[in-house]
Image (cartoon, helix red, strand yellow):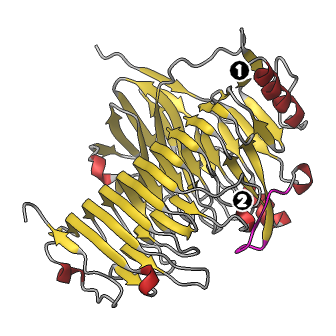
């Protein structure tokens, strides 16, 4: 007799229900959200969210008989079977999957692990934004003051849980303080208003020519801050960007030590969504990042000048870069509100991460005004992208060293935004400096479909020289990569020929 537990979450009233899919897990209905943030542009994809323990059976029903399907990442090799209009498979561990059925938009399955030690809604050291501070759970009345008051009360008490119950809470910018744990219960939404008047402008995005704000940030110098739960942080960014030409970032921990995010959904930021900036000791797990694929410059997770960062078991969907590391100049408009001085990017690990993008899936770059070193992408899965692996220094002349890509599975490179290829190592001179790249290790990469263009390894000049690159155990469309010549590329004078190895060679 199998022992299982399945926990589902209410569909927030502000989100449309999918008309294409119904989902059950061990017979329990799971709400399916139609993700459609771009005004007037229709559904881009769907997602179903639940938590479980044990081994469960997932059943996906459509309106018509199913002819073709895939369950990605394909590397997981999840057996599935079809009967009529139903696709069925089993899960025995937490997975983030992208299911493609016939010509329907993709269905994203968010199968989370059961929460450990979820806090109660009431009790000692619990600060409930609705019950204790009067925040409106319908989204009608602005809840910024109530939520901030709960945060401030927890901080003053020496720490505590700020509890956000099921419901929609409309907020402007809020600031988290030391030893505060912001908990979002399943079915809860902290939702940005779409009115720029509700915010203090914190940055200017030069390439978009728009001002913007931070929805949830941290007090500089703070420590021991946690955001967890199975709720949602929603920026309404696509609407605000289109209608008001104003941007927001969802989460901006700045100058913070010991920052943790576990389990929440972050969706619809108008610009780059989650930006740890000049922080240390950052842990991000079970994060689900959803962006529109119709507006560019909307990265999901950008690690900016941080040290000792772990991003593990996440999924990121966007038009631009799902995962990247950056280091900006102190006078860059995007960084003007960050604490000084600028810092290096060091000891960053992305592990068990799923990417779907129109741009670069796993990227180091672009800003390189500080040294970027000891950065690892491990167990990475690319559903679709223009570029899969990208080391792309520009905007700054500091070096980029000790970069590792390990156990990467690349399914498709169908999009075409610039150079379409599975590998790009490119130092580019754009008039703002250029620095060298060395010590790149690319190991155990499976390229199922490599797209229409060859890899690009190129240096802008001698200051941006590329050296000490090793590719080991790479398979391209079923063929082992044994020699450099198989890549079919010509190197310029500032690039040392990469070493290619396969097996015991």
**Quadrant of the rendered image containing residue 174:** top right
Instruction: Decide: is 402 above or below 495.
Output: above
| Chief secondary structure of the magenta portion | loop
Instruction: Decide: is 60 above or below 498.
Output: above
Q: Give the farthest residue toward the top.
A: 124
The residue positioned 77% from the left and 17% from the top of the image is 157
Residue 433 location (% of width, % of height): 57, 80
The residue positioned 40% from the left and 55% from the top of the image is 374
Task: Determine which residue is flagged by label 1.
Answer: 159
Residue 173's disc is none
Where are the magenta residues, as a range?
A: 201-209
Is residue 434 rendered magenta in the image? no
Instruction: Decide: is 503 above or below 94.
Output: below
Circles 2 and 1, Cβ within 8 Å, touching? The answer is: no
Task: Determine which residue is flagged by label 2.
Answer: 270
Q: Earlier in the sequence, mark 2 or mark 1?
A: 1
Inspect this view and state whether residue 493 appears. yes
**Badge 2, how many Cα within 10 Å: few under 14, some, many 20+?**
many
Q: Nearer the viewer, residue 64 or 166?
A: 166
Residue 89 location (% of width, % of height): 33, 39
Residue 125 location (% of width, % of height): 72, 13
């Amino acid at each position: 007799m199998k022992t299982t537990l399945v926990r589902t979450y209410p569909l927030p009233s502000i989100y449309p229900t999918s008309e294409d899919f119904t989902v059950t897990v061990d017979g329990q209905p799971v709400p399916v959200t139609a993700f459609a943030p771009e005004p007037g542009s229709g559904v881009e994809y769907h997602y179903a969210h639940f938590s479980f323990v044990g081994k469960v059976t997932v059943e996906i029903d459509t309106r018509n008989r199913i002819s073709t399907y895939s369950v990605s990442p394909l590397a997981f090799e999840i057996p599935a079977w079809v009967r009529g209009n139903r696709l069925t498979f089993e899960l025995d561990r937490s997975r983030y999957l992208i299911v493609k059925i016939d010509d329907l938009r993709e269905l994203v399955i968010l199968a989370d692990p059961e929460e450990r030690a979820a806090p109660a809604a009431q009790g000692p050291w619990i600060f409930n934004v609705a019950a204790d501070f009067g925040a409106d759970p319908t989204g009608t009345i602005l809840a910024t003051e109530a939520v901030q008051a709960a945060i401030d009360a927890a901080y003053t008490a020496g720490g505590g849980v700020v509890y956000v119950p099921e419901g929609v809470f409309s907020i402007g910018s809020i600031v988290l303080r030391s030893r505060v744990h912001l908990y979002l219960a399943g079915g809860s939404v902290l939702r940005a208003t779409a009115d720029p008047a509700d915010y203090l402008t914190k940055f200017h995005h030069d390439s978009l020519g728009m001002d913007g704000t931070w929805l949830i940030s941290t007090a500089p110098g703070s420590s021991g801050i946690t955001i967890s739960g199975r709720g949602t942080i929603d920026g309404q960014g696509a609407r605000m960007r289109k209608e008001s030409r104003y941007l927001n970032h969802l989460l901006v921990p700045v100058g913070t030590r010991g920052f943790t995010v576990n389990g929440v959904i972050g969706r619809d930021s108008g610009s780059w969504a989650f930006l740890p900036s000049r922080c240390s000791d950052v842990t991000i797990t079970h994060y689900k990042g959803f962006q529109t694929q119709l507006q560019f410059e909307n990265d999901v997770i950008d690690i900016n000048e941080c040290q000792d960062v772990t991003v593990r078991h996440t999924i990121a969907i966007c038009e631009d870069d799902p995962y990247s590391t950056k280091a900006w100049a102190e006078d860059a408009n995007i960084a003007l509100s960050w604490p000084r001085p600028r810092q290096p990017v060091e000891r960053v690990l992305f592990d068990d991460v799923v990417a779907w993008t129109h741009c670069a899936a796993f990227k180091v770059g672009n800003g390189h005004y500080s040294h970027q070193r000891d950065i690892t992408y491990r167990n990475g899965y690319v559903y679709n992208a223009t570029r899969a692996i990208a080391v792309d220094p520009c905007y700054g002349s500091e070096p980029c060293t000790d970069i590792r890509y390990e156990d990467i599975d690349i399914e498709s490179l169908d999009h075409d935004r610039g150079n379409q290829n599975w590998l790009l190592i490119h130092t580019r001179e754009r008039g703002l400096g250029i620095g060298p790249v060395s010590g790149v290790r690319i190991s155990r990469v499976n390229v199922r479909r490599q797209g229409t263009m060859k890899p690009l390894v190129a240096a802008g000049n001698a200051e941006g020289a590329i050296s000490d690159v090793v590719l080991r155990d790479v398979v391209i469309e079923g063929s082992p990569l044994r020699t450099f010549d198989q890549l079919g590329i010509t190197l310029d004078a500032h690039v040392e020929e990469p070493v290619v190895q396969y097996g015991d060679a």
